[in-house]
Image (cartoon, grey):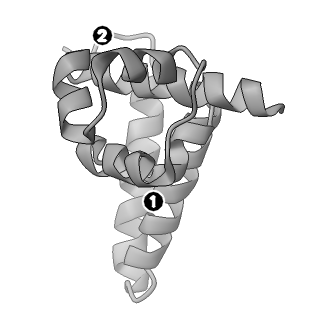
């Protein structure tokens, strides 16, 4: 990935997150201490964002700072991997019975996802 492609990707991700949260470009620019015009350049990939502002954005959007570096599909994979790690860490000291309950529940969810019958 070139430097320009990376700037564009980061800018697109900033814009998507801003719009998804209903934040205007003016509001976000004010929080970052930059002009709306400069933020527009960042979102279009014409200008880069500073590391400090990238961390501010991560804090504002409640996402990891590196999430701005992934395409949506890559980010979904990243998030699912993180969730799998979290589940693994939570169940490390579960008993065999507790693990069987989790397996039973997961199988039930899997059946619901693949079932063609309406749930109600």
Q: Is residue 74 above or below residue 96?
A: above
Measuring from the top left, give residue 3's x and y in whole percent.
77, 33
Q: Locate residue 85, reporting x and y percent.
A: 52, 66
Please provide percent x and percent y for residue 78: 58, 47
**Residue under pointer 2:** 118
The crowding category of the residue bearing disc 2, from other C-alpha atoms within 10 Å (few below 14, some 14 to 19, many at least 20), is few
Q: Are marks 2 and 1 in contact (CB under 8 Å)?
A: no
If you read the primary sequence from the N terminus, does the residue marked by circle 2 or circle 1 appear first? 1
Query: Label 1 neighbourhood size at 10 Å, few (<14), some (14-19), many (20+)?
Result: few
Snapshot quadrant of residue 14:
top left
Label drawn at residue 88: none
Q: Taking 90 as reference, is 61 above or below it? A: above
Residue 117, quarter of the rendered image: top left
Position above or below: 42 against 55: above
Q: Which residue is drawn at 35% across and 26% down?
A: 17
Residue 91 location, x and y as percent?
Answer: 41, 77
Closer-to-camera residue (64/101): 64
Mark 1 = which residue? Answer: 103
């Amino acid at each position: 990935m070139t430097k320009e492609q990376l700037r564009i990707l980061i800018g697109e991700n900033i814009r998507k997150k801003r719009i998804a949260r209903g934040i205007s470009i003016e509001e976000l620019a004010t929080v970052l201490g930059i002009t709306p015009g400069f933020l527009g350049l960042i979102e279009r990939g014409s200008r880069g964002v500073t590391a400090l502002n990238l961390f501010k954005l991560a804090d504002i959007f409640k996402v990891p700072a590196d999430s701005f570096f992934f395409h949506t599909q890559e980010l979904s994979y990243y998030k699912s991997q993180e969730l799998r790690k979290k589940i693994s860490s939570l169940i490390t000291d579960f008993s065999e019975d507790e693990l069987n309950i989790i397996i039973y529940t997961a199988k039930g969810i899997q059946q619901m996802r693949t079932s063609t019958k309406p749930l109600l």
